[in-house]
Amino acid sequence: MRVSIIPAIFCGLPSWNSSTGSAAWSSGGYARSQVPAGCVNLPARAHFPAVKSFDTFDFTAIASLNKPLVLELARCEYIVARDNIIALGNSGTGKTHTCLALGLAACQRGFSVAFYTAAGLVHQLMEARDERRLLKLQAQLAAVKLLIIDELGYVPLSQTGAELLFEVFSQRHEHGSAIVTSNLPFEEWTSVFQSPRLTGALLDRLTHHVHILELNGESYRLKHSKARRRREAQQADKTAEIPASS
Ligand code: ADP
Ligand code: MG
């Protein structure tokens, strides 16, 4: 989906960096310079992963998700309070959909939002460090009102990567909100950050003022592809039942 379909009135210019897995919107109220480098001036070939809203989210499909809490969070008061959100659950249960919808809601209310995958953000931080522009990137990340970090847990981080990501959370602590999604329960986060000490310090900051969303259940994708296959099989059976003479 091309980014240009995102309503410009809501978000200003969003951008998606497909090579590093990051995207960002700058609201009209925020200077471009506050948005992380590489997140504006979209390369022509780049695509935003998806535009998602709660209008297309089926809450009945995920019983573990606290719908009243999600709808409350969509009002964005947690951003004013500088609270964080952590969405936990297995793959395909709507974590990315939820954080993109919360991101869109934040844009609609004029907050600056930056979206990254955890691996994409670490990649950008390491690159910035190598190019001696880490402080600038860190300052830009700290200035964004809502930082969304998706897919923490799929890829274990190197020690440097873990430390750089920790610094991002540390610098934002009580200054701005973050949404983090992960397929791993908290007790397994050490496997991502390698160090129990670092993981403990990170969780301490992240969960100080936090709203936890639980998305555990059958994968939405899997459920839908199973239902489709069932329909196709039923259709094939019906076709086979038609007598050859008819
Ligand atoms: P996760 O990030 O948890 O792996 P995603 O958010 O990527 O899952 O969801 C996988 C796909 O299923 C996406 O296309 C998403 O829009 C869709 N999806 C997941 N849950 C729901 C839901 N409850 N209602 C509508 N679509 C959903
Ligand atoms: Mg996801």
Image (tube, rainbow, N blue to C red):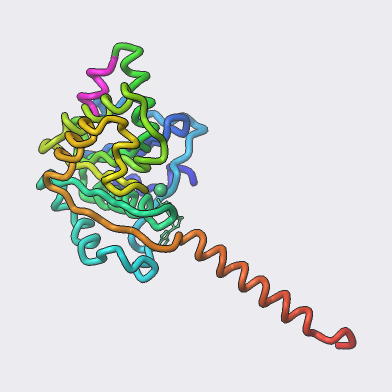
Depth order, front residue of 46/96 = 96
Range covered by the magenta-colored residues? 133-141
Residue 31 visible in rendering? no
Task: Give the left or right position of residue 102, taking residue 219 as reference.
Answer: left
Ligand 1: which quarter? bottom left
Q: What quarter of the picture does the C terminus occupy? A: bottom right
Q: Position of residue 151 (x, y in %)?
A: 37, 42
Asked where in the image residue 13 lies, by quadrant, the reply is top left
Q: Where 83 falls versus 201 (above or below)? A: below
Task: Give the left or right position of residue 97, taking residue 87 as reference.
Answer: right
Q: Where 118 falls versus 52 (above or below)? A: above
Task: Give the left or right position of residue 112, taking residue 234 as reference.
Answer: left
Residue 72 visible in rendering? yes
Q: Position of residue 160 (x, y in %)?
A: 31, 21
Q: Position of residue 145 (x, y in %)?
A: 19, 39
Residue shown at the point (19%, 61%) measured from the top left:
72
Residue shown at the point (39%, 32%) measured from the top left:
120
Q: Where 117 falls versus 41 (above or below)? A: below
Q: Position of residue 142 (x, y in %)?
A: 19, 30
Magenta part, dominant SS = helix
Residue shown at the point (39%, 54%) measured from the top left:
90
Residue shown at the point (37%, 38%) measured from the top left:
117
Residue 134 in magenta stretch: yes
Residue 45 in magenta stretch: no
